[in-house]
Image: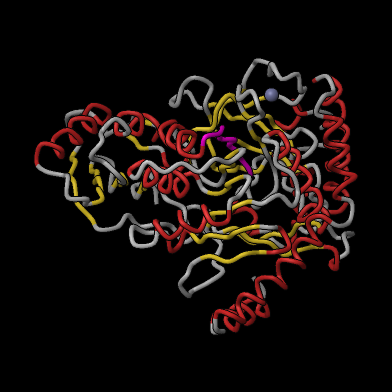
């Protein structure tokens, strides 16, 4: 964020609630104009059309966009000129997705180190937006996006996904996400520009959860969107009081969605969950369609590769993506830190967009056994989900052979229950793992208010 942005933010948070409400709505209208003005409608209509093209035609379009961005990077971006020269490559050597392996990966470290050499010399500064991500681990990355990508292209792609869940621009929705917009109770606000009730995950606790549910009922939204852990938390509370709120769809994103979370959300909101994947760096996007056979990759938006890792098995690896639209600061083969697998199948919905069969979490969330074997978070999760006494927990890997399970103390965790948890942990980590359990009053969240199932401290 710029200096001015930080000053404005400070000023905003020192204001009384009524002024903040006006502030959020002024910002909301500005934001809505950026999102849905300009070419938004045209791009959305184009995307609505191209999603039905046969895979070969989509590939052709993608390769055409790739060749353009490669040519641009070579002639206008000093970092990429060097990368090509060092390898004796010319733009003509990268004609299609399969040629991308000739180029190195782009990482957060490389971006930080080569920031100014990654900016395209011919791209007008006035049309670039400085954007940043906190990242789930709190590592902040700053980068430039073209205005068009930041707003119209991003939102047209998002709304194509949303329409699969039969949600469209302007319909009533509740958003439960990690954006800080208030520091006063009550922790919600209405953004009139988008007919949206904003609920803060930062303040979602056992003390506020019932008020949140009450607000949602009062607002009577068509859809709910936000981080799966927060929505699942609301749903499990609703389950305890046998409350249901009927909506058209729940749209989740920003964190790994686990099967048990999907189940409780679908039961309590009486609809399907549509999970989506994306990132602030705007390199790749994918989401579930109405038949839920995987995550359709937005081929017109970015190129997605999966760098398979034998240790993780079943085709799983880190998702690496190339933006087809970032002409301000080209992101080519950017390591997203997310893990997934590509699907061989076409979706039965008939769309030509290829599928990721699954997304399984962050690379930082992989736990290793004392013997060095990798264990995915989803393995623990599936077993722990069956323990009714376990409400919230977090597994921390402290070192190569020591692990700590934080468990929310809800008054139901005795010796026998702890033994059950330990047994599951030893099943995955092996008998030599040094495992302990700590009962806590609250499970810590990351700066982005995301809830992490796993924290691996042995990596850093
Ligand atoms: Zn489909």
Q: Main secondary structure of the magenta part?
A: strand
Q: Is residue 225 above or below residue 30?
A: above
Across and down, in percent, residue 288 comes to 63, 31
Quadrant location, the N terminus: bottom right
Across and down, in percent, residue 71 comes to 88, 42
Where's ligand 1: which quadrant? Answer: top right
| Residue name at image x 25 percent, y 33 percent | 387
Q: Which residues are magenta?
A: 270-278
Q: Is residue 63 left or right of residue 185?
A: right
Q: Is residue 259 left or right of residue 148?
A: left
| Residue name at image x 23 percent, y 43 percent | 402
Q: Is residue 283 above or below residue 344?
A: below
Residue 143 inside the magenta-drawn segment: no
How many numbered marks, from 0 up? 0
- The front one of 388 and 380 is 388
- The front one of 220 and 179 is 220
- The front one of 165 and 405 is 165
Across and down, in percent, residue 417 comes to 15, 38
């Amino acid at each position: 964020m710029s200096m001015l942005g930080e000053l404005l933010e400070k000023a905003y948070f020192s204001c009384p609630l009524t002024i903040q409400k006006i502030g959020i709505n002024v910002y909301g209208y500005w934001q809505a104009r950026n999102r849905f003005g300009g070419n938004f409608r045209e791009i959305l209509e184009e995307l609505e059309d191209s999603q039905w093209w046969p895979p070969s035609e989509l590939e052709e379009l993608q390769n055409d966009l790739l060749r353009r961005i490669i040519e641009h990077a070579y002639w206008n971006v000093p970092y990429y000129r060097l990368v090509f020269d060092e390898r004796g490559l010319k733009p003509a050597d990268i004609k299609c997705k399969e040629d991308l392996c000739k180029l190195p990966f782009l990482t957060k470290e490389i971006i930080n180190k080569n920031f100014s050499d990654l900016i395209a010399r011919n791209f007008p500064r006035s049309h670039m937006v400085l954007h940043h991500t906190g990242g789930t681990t709190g590592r902040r990355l700053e980068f430039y996006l073209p205005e068009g990508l930041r707003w119209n292209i991003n939102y047209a792609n998002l709304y194509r996904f949303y329409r699969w869940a039969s949600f469209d621009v302007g319909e009533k929705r509740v958003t439960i996400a990690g954006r800080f917009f208030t520091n006063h109770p009550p922790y919600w606000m209405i953004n009139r520009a988008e007919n949206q009730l904003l609920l803060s995950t930062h303040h979602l606790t056992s003390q506020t959860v019932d008020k949140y549910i009450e607000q949602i009922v009062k607002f009577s939204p068509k859809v709910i969107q936000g981080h799966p852990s927060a929505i699942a938390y609301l749903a499990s509370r609703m389950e305890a009081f046998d409350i249901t709120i009927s909506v058209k769809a729940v749209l989740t994103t920003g964190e790994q969605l686990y099967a048990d979370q999907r189940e409780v959300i679908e039961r309590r909101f009486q609809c399907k969950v549509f999970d989506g994947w994306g990132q602030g760096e705007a390199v790749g996007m994918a989401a579930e369609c109405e038949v839920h056979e995987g995550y359709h990759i937005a081929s017109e938006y970015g190129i997605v590769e999966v760098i398979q890792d034998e240790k993780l098995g079943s085709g799983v690896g880190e998702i690496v993506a190339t933006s087809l639209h970032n002409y301000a600061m080209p992101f080519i083969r950017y390591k997203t830190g997310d893990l997934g697998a590509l699907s061989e199948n076409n979706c039965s919905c008939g769309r030509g967009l290829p599928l990721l069969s699954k997304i399984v979490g962050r690379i930082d969330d992989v736990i290793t056994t004392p013997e060095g074997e990798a264990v995915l978070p989803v393995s623990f999760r599936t077993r722990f989900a069956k323990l009714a006494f376990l409400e919230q927990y977090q597994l921390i890997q402290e070192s190569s052979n020591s692990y700590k399970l934080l468990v929310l103390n809800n008054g139901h965790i005795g010796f026998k229950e702890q033994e059950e948890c330990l047994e599951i942990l030893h099943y995955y980590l092996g008998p030599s793992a040094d495992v302990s359990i700590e009962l806590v009053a609250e499970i810590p969240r990351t700066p982005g208010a995301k809830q992490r199932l796993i924290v691996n401290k042995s990596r850093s």
